[in-house]
Image (cartoon, helix red, strand yellow):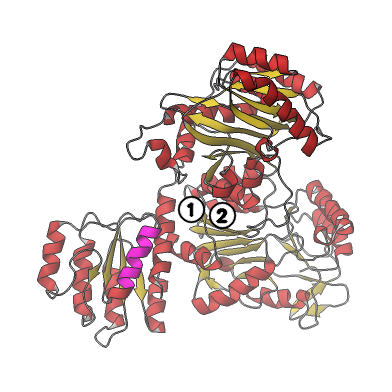
């Protein structure tokens, strides 16, 4: 313990006192003392009698580098830096942290922190933090970027009797990150479930790769802080404004097989449920109170789960043991006058039904209910059981906790926990193959080089040439510099036509009337002049490259296909309802590229407007297979070139095929 202190309340004193219970040798380091809190105190790391397994540093930031250097020279390979005053305080702190990183890499030191709470390992009774509470031993590990949040959690967990295997405060993550600890915990026999509180992730690809490997065997539940973005500047595309930070993180988590919790309550509920159960299936509700039974049924539907359909044998068996006024169907209402024997018998009958995956047992605290026997009944059931035992006494609740059976006051909360188990059971952890379509790569290379050489960063409808190289069909088009050219193009492609401005400065053309639809022969010239005039009037400094003349595409359903390069996770693909209302309805889905056909189909099915693509009120189904292929081709294009943002809006989907009508692209800035 480097920075051990004799002064009560100081971090160096609190940590040293916490280390009393550690099952191993503890050395205090402070040149001012020969002994602190019963531990022999050494003047420096170099004077220690041996190279220890772990060093904890809690000294002023300016002195940490030298202490870390001493650790490296002594052969100490694991170090926790509790000290604050690094990159979190600004430029000077950033410089100090960079020096720590250099020293850690020089000596191959596994550095946790700086600016962290520390670490707890309940298995060996190691509390290397300044929390004076040692949490209960359990099978759930907890990683958090916030040390203050850990302190609050430890305090709560003691009252809630929630146990942990390991707790790690990540701090500034100078060396060790979430991915490093996930990798370790994936192999840790004492950990069955991992909870994660995240504020930001720097290496998103490494995180996803590690998380998916670990989550296949051990559920990971994450809560992300920072879900809203205030003061965001107008983006250059719909995709840019819709693919916000939290949406990207959430997409990455789900693609990695991680269960997402939206609240602290959910974080712990989901962890407790997944610590025991890994599959949910259809739900059967057994209750002695109609109201909570209805609440649970509503929650099942809201969460997208299914109530089990009890088979004939189950219903007949229930008729024999329940009063005639009871409900023999799901939810099974055993009535308010039920004693614990009626409850136990009903529970056993329902559990024997092959169509029941999970049972939600709800008991209001009536005079007839003996919670001692009710708990015994639940523990005898072989299937997953979630309890909603209202008013249960502390002793029996602890029995449920010790047997890892979730118990909730609120039926809705119980169903949410079941939903988390169901979500985890349905994750696809198989290794994916990513299709690569044959494309006209030579032509695409030439087109892209021309765009780059032009010096333009924003590429508008002229970028549709690139789509064509990737097998994405476009409506016939041409770019006119004069009204006469516009007429020639219109004659060659046929009427009616659409006309729109070609300018790197005009992003949303319809906002200033720089687009004309259903233009016939007699109106081509006047439309050309009107479009130019409107742009010059509203945006006098805008660069005008011409007017696009395009074949009007009638019918079909408008969808949007977009891509935004995220700094942490790479290319994020967006799909949703298209047209000018995309940002109003925000009915979109996201995936991180590269994608395969299954990913594309999942994206399409996950939007609320999927019903419009399937066909409603007699409409024929649209070509969803062609749409899915277009999404994968679009993903392939995004991976082949340095593109910051890209969007087809609208992409029109027909009964047969898809056609891109408008396109825009933002090239990456050269570093």
Please give left or right for residue 380 compared with residue 192 in the image.
Answer: left
Rendered position, 288 above or below 184: below
Q: What range of the chain is rendered magenta?
A: 292-302
Magenta span contains residue 125: no
Determine which residue is flagged by label 1: 218
Give the prevailing secondary structure in the magenta stretch: helix
Please give left or right for residue 457 compared with residue 307 in the image.
Answer: right
Please give left or right for residue 126 compared with residue 535 in the image.
Answer: left
At a point 66% along the width and 15% down the height, the residue shown is: 487
Which class describes the residues within 10 Å of circle 1: few (<14), some (14-19), or many (20+)? many
* Residue toward you, 36 or 658: 658
Give x and y (percent) for residue 222: 56, 57
Label 2 with label 1: CB-CB less than 8 Å:
yes
Q: Secondary structure at mark 2?
A: helix
Q: Secondary structure at mark 1?
A: loop
| Quadrant assignment, res 661 | top right
Determine which residue is flagged by label 2: 185
In the image as oriented, which residue stretches furthest toward the front?
522
Rendered position, 541 above or below 407: above
Question: Which image quarter is the N terminus in?
Answer: bottom right
Please give left or right for residue 72 compared with residue 22 in the image.
Answer: right
Give x and y (percent) for residue 555: 46, 29
Q: Earlier in the sequence, mark 2 or mark 1?
A: 2
Magenta span contains residue 298: yes
| Quadrant assignment, res 13 | bottom right
At a point 85% along the width and 55% down the height, the residue shown is: 94
* Residue toward you, 498 or 602: 498
Give x and y (percent) for residue 262: 54, 61
At a point 44% along the width and 57% down the height, the residue shown is: 420
């Amino acid at each position: 313990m480097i920075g051990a202190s004799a002064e009560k309340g100081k971090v160096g004193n609190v940590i040293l006192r916490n280390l009393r219970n550690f099952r191993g040798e503890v050395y205090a380091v402070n040149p001012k003392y020969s002994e602190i809190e019963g531990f022999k105190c050494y003047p420096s790391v170099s004077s220690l009698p041996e190279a220890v397994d772990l060093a904890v540093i809690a000294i002023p930031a300016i002195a940490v580098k030298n202490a870390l250097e001493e650790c490296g020279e002594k052969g100490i390979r694991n170090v926790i830096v509790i000290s604050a005053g690094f990159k979190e305080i600004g430029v000077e702190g950033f410089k100090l942290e960079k020096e720590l990183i250099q020293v850690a890499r020089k000596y191959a030191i596994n550095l946790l922190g700086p600016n962290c709470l520390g670490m707890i390992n309940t298995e060996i009774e190691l509390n290397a933090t300044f929390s004076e509470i040692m949490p209960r031993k359990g099978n759930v590990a907890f990683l958090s970027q916030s040390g203050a949040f850990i302190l609050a959690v430890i305090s709560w967990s003691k009252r809630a009797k929630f146990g942990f295997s390991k707790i790690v405060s990540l701090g500034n993550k100078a060396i060790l990150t979430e991915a490093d600890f996930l990798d370790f915990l994936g192999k840790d026999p004492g950990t069955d479930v991992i909870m994660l509180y995240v504020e930001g992730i720097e290496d998103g690809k490494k995180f996803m790769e590690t998380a998916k490997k670990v989550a296949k065997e051990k559920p990971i539940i994450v809560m992300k802080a920072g879900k809203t973005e205030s003061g965001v500047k107008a983006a250059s595309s719909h995709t840019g404004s819709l693919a916000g930070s939290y949406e990207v993180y959430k997409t990455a988590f789900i693609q990695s097989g991680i269960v997402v919790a939206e609240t602290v309550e959910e974080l712990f509920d989901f962890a407790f449920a997944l610590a025991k159960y890994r599959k949910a299936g259809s739900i059967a509700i057994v209750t002695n109170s109609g109201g909570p039974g209805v609440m649970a049924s509503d929650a099942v539907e809201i969460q997208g789960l299914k109530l089990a359909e009890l088979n004939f044998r189950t219903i007949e068996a229930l008729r024999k043991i329940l009063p005639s006024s009871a409900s023999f169907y799901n939810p099974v209402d055993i009535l308010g006058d039920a004693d614990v024997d009626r409850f136990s018998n009903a529970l056993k009958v329902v559990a024997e039904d092959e169509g029941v995956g999970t049972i939600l047992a709800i008991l209001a605290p009536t005079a007839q209910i003996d919670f001692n026997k009710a708990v015994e009944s639940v523990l005898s059931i072989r299937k997953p059981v979630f309890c909603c035992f209202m008013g249960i006494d502390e002793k029996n609740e602890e029995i449920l906790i010790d047997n890892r059976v979730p118990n909730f006051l609120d039926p809705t909360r119980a169903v949410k926990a079941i939903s988390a188990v169901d979500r985890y059971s349905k994750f696809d952890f198989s290794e994916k193959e990513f299709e690569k379509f044959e494309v006209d790569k030579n032509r695409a290379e030439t087109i892209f080089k021309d765009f780059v050489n032009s010096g333009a960063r924003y590429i508008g409808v002229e970028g549709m040439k690139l789509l064509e190289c990737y097998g994405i069909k476009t409506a016939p088009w041409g770019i006119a510099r004069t009204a006469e050219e516009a007429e020639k193009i219109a004659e060659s492609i046929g009427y009616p036509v659409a006309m729109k401005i070609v300018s790197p400065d005009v992003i949303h053309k319809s906002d200033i009337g720089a687009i004309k639809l259903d233009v016939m022969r007699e109106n081509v010239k006047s439309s050309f002049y009107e479009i130019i005039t409107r742009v010059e009037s509203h945006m006098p400094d805008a660069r005008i490259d011409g007017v696009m003349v395009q074949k009007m595409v009638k019918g079909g359903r408008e969808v949007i296909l977009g891509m935004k390069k995220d700094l942490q996770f790479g290319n994020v693909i967006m799909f949703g309802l298209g047209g000018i209302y995309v940002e109003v309805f925000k009915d979109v889905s996201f995936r991180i590229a590269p994608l395969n056909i299954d990913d594309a189909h999942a994206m399409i099915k996950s939007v609320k407007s999927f019903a419009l693509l399937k066909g409603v009120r007699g409409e024929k189904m649209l070509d969803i297979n062609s749409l899915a292929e277009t999404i994968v081709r679009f993903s392939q294009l995004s991976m082949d070139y340095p593109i910051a943002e890209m969007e087809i809006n609208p992409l029109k989907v027909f009964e047969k095929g898809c056609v891109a009508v408008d396109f825009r692209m933002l090239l990456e800035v050269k570093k």
